[in-house]
Structure formats: C-alpha cells, structure tokens
Image (cartoon, coloured by chain):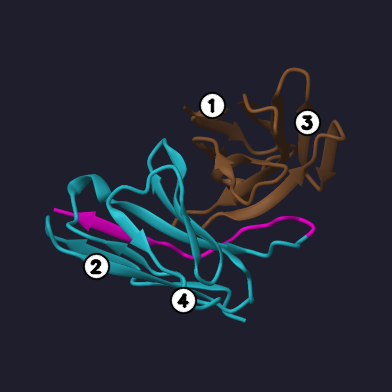
Chain colours: A cyan, B brown
Amino acid sequence: NAGVTQTPKFRILKIGQSMTLQCTQDMNHNYMYWYRQDPGMGLKLIYYSVGAGITDKGEVPNGYNVSRSTTEDFPLRLELAAPSQTSVYFCASSWELAVRNEQYFGPGTRLTVT
Amino acid sequence: QQQVKQSPQSLIVQKGGISIINCAYENTAFDYFPWYQQFPGKGPALLIAIRPDVSEKKEGRFTISFNKSAKQFSLHIMDSQPGDSATYFCAAEETSGSRLTFGEGTQLTVNP
C-alpha cells in the first residue's frame, strides 16, 4: 500500500510554461484534494473532488485546473505559470465514510517559477 | 477571510516542558477539529482530533482542550521531546462538508 504518491518531487518552471502535477492514491478513497503550502499561510485548498467525474473549486483555484477521470488519479494542471505559484503542493485523499475523517497526504511537490 | 486563526506562529520549548498551541474559529457550523503534524520534507499527518460533544481528548502525551462557547481549542504536548519538533496545524470541518479549513501553522522546536 503506497498511500498517496506525487510526482515530481521538485520542479523549476519558467514564467509562462505549463505543467501537470501528478497524484495517485491506492486506498480506494473517493475524496481527493489539492493544497498549496506557503510559509506562515497554512494549507490552502485549490481544488477537490468527491468522486470520479466530480470536481469543485477551493479557496485559491485561479491559475489551476483539475480532472478526475478515475478514482485513483487527480492531476493538477498549471497553465501559464507565474511567480505567485511558487509553493509546495500537496495532494491528499480521504474516505467519505471513515470514522476519523482523516486526510492522507502525499509527500509534496516543491515548485519554483522563475 | 481566515476562518481558523492559530497562534503562536513559532514556539520554542525545552525538553520535558509543555507545548501549548491555540486556535480560534468563527464558523459555528464547524463540528470536527483535527490537529495535523508535519515533519520537514513530509506531508501533514493526522495527530489527534475532537468533536464538540466533549471538552477534552487525550492520546498519550497529546491533549486537545475544547471550549465551545469561546470557539477555541488548543493542543497541549506534555513532556515535550526533541522528536516532537515539527509544524502543527489545527483545522476545522463543517457537519455536512468534505473540506478542512486549516490554521496558519505553528513551528515547534523542542530543545534538548
């Protein structure tokens, strides 16, 4: 059981470039989330999904897109990268009916836009 | 609008001391309050959580105290150890929701 995996671990982008951050979970969780973490700002929700084919915006969705074609995968797309998107990105998943309502986080992707 | 406010931003404690981190919320629809622990280079992981029907929950050296009328809750780490050095996030979730709202985080350093 690998849990939540994210690729790549690190990436440097030039302004205006695009990229996709990959996230996969093998726990058959129906809920999946994308957060960004900036120093002193906590974790901000970008997008989330309650099941395959269903996605919704979080607090800071501008500049990002997501899709959820399968239960396992929830990629995050950055179009026209900007320096403000320099951050650490975390993917997480949870099970709707779990008693502890626990979110399981991946190891993160550190993205720098220059 | 920051719905969950966390303090302090950083905390330094001596080994064996008590670490206390506080959070306050505004949304009265919140009914689940977890704390997450994050070590450098890792993703956050659930540490302990409480629902508002109890005022305190203890798991080992970690205790959550909850004050519903004041809309505040806190994490107490007893006998703090250097291995507890990490960033701690409080969070809150609404009854019908699937989303967590996180506080800003507290970087805890426990000196040996």
Amino acid under label 1? Pro
Answer with left or right where residue A86 lies relative to residue B110.
left
Amino acid under label 3? Ser
Q: Which residue is mark 4?
A: A69
Nearer the observer: mark 3 or 4; the answer is 4
Q: What's the magenta region?
A: A99-114
- Relative image position of residue A36 (x, y in whole percent): 40, 50
Q: Which residue is mark 2?
A: A19
Amino acid under label 2? Met
Which residue shows up at 54% across the image and 36% down it? Answer: B103
Which residue shows up at 49% across the image and 29% down it? Answer: B2
Q: Mark 2 near mark 4, Cβ–Cβ under 8 Å? A: no
Q: From the viewer's side, name the closer residue of B83 and B24.
A: B24
Q: Secondary structure at mark 4?
A: loop
Chain letter for the residue marked with disc 3 in the picture: B
Answer with left or right where residue B100 lies relative to residue B18.
left
Q: Is residue A110 magenta?
A: yes
Q: Secondary structure at mark 2?
A: strand
- Residue A8 sits in quarter: bottom left
* Number of other residues with Cα within 10 Å of mark 1, as a class: few under 14, some 14 to 19, many 20 or more: some
* Number of other residues with Cα within 10 Å of mark 3, as a class: few under 14, some 14 to 19, many 20 or more: some
Q: Is residue A111 above or below residue B112?
A: below
Q: Mark 3 near mark 4, Cβ–Cβ under 8 Å? A: no
Q: Report the disc number at residue A92.
A: none
- What is the C-alpha distance between the residues marked 3 and 4? 41 Å
